[in-house]
Amino acid sequence: MEILDARALPADHSDILHVTPSTVYFRRRLDGDQFHISRFDLEDQEQVDLTTEPLQDHGPTRPFVKQGKVYCLNEQDRNEGGETSLLAIDLHSGTSEQLASWQLGGDLTLYWVLNARYMVLLHVDQTTTAFLYDVETRQQHVIKDERLYGITENYRELYFFLVTLDATDYIVCNARLDEFSFYDALESGVISPEDPIDHSESLLIASLATIVAEIEQGVERLSFQTLLRLEGEGDTVQYLGEQTGNLVFSAYTERLNEEVFYEIKDESAITEHERIRWSDYEPLDFTYDDVESTIFIVNERSDQHHEVMNLRTGARYLDREPFERVLRDRFYLHESIGEDAEPMVTVFDGEQNVRHRFEDAYYMIVSGELVILSVKQLK
């Protein structure tokens, strides 16, 4: 486990882009608009800017990392009619490639990088529009279905992500309905009284090729298929990662206190894998590890210990500090609040049987690596 002095890294959590065992790649801000794409080498503790000149973005800056490249916008002299460039910067060589350029009023935002070929951009100039840019053909097409760029209609939140199943790319969406928008949609006739309300969730899926073809054709509503649709308030859908080439999801129904695990092979094939009635285990707390697709339940607790069960392997753990995440079947992570109401992170190394505690800290998983930003490490 490498421990890095955070004072040597001028970045907060929103600036960390990519992490390897030897290097942290981040956005080094110069001011509100200007920044460099930089790296910090853990071994020699040196910082290097990959960009030779500062980049500039006046709106929400959203660099994306895909297959060893950082994708971001560079706005130069916007007030003087300058252009906005879409750049791809190689993480290893630092080589920068201009993929496209635009001269537009208002603000342009890189909203989503689907893959190395397709990008979703937002243009805000009194109104908000979105378009899909094809890097290979250099063509762009307006996206008419607002769901794809965050205008959520009667949904409160839409979580889109790209997955590959059997060499085919799919867009998957976990959609959560908003209670207030539900009533508005109910009055307007967009949805019916039978539709679920607040906190109810749906799972939508479509192949990337289908979505791209429909956007190019100007389709008003993209043909996402609804694979899962839950019944009522408190019901949730949880993404559990990819296992044996399939997507794994669970659907929890609060009314039944029951959870069903599904495997998805393509946009039309969904099979039930397992069913758990949580009433058989109560009183228990359960949580998901979104790093390694593991389900934990707290089986027993006292002032002296927590017993935590890993439902994936059946393993049981006794510890005074409960944990909510596991990385590489070795590092057990626990977030808590310290005596001064400051956030704390505890990492237990299951191989070395050593505990690391960090004060005024939080953690995240970037590129499969654990990153802890902390003011102080405690013994």
Image (spheres, rainbow, N blue to C red):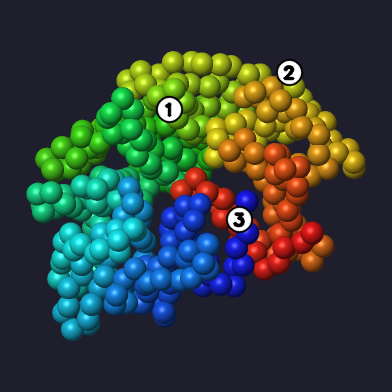
In-image side of 374 versus 369 (left or right) = right
Q: Are marks 3 and 2 in contact (CB under 8 Å)?
A: no
Q: Nearer the viewer, mark 1 or mark 3?
A: 3
Checking the image for residue 280, the label placed there is 2
Identify the residue at the far bottom of this view: 80
Q: Amino acid at mark 3?
A: Glu
Q: Residue at x 51, y 72 (%)?
A: 10
Q: Position of residue 149 (x, y in %)?
A: 32, 50
In-image side of 377 versus 187 (left or right) = right
Q: Are marks 1 and 3 in contact (CB under 8 Å)?
A: no
Corner quadrant of residue 245: top left
Q: Nearer the viewer, mark 3 or mark 2?
A: 3
Q: Position of residue 330 (x, y in %)?
A: 65, 39
Q: Are marks 2 and 1 in contact (CB under 8 Å)?
A: no
The CA distance from mark 2 to mark 1 is 27 Å
| Residue bearing the label numbered 1 | 247
Checking the image for residue 2, the label placed there is 3
Count neighbours of disc 1 (C-alpha within 10 A) and say few if under 14, some if 14 to 19, many if 20 or more: some
Residue 110 in the image: above or below residue 365 = below
Q: Is residue 71 in sight in this rendering?
A: no
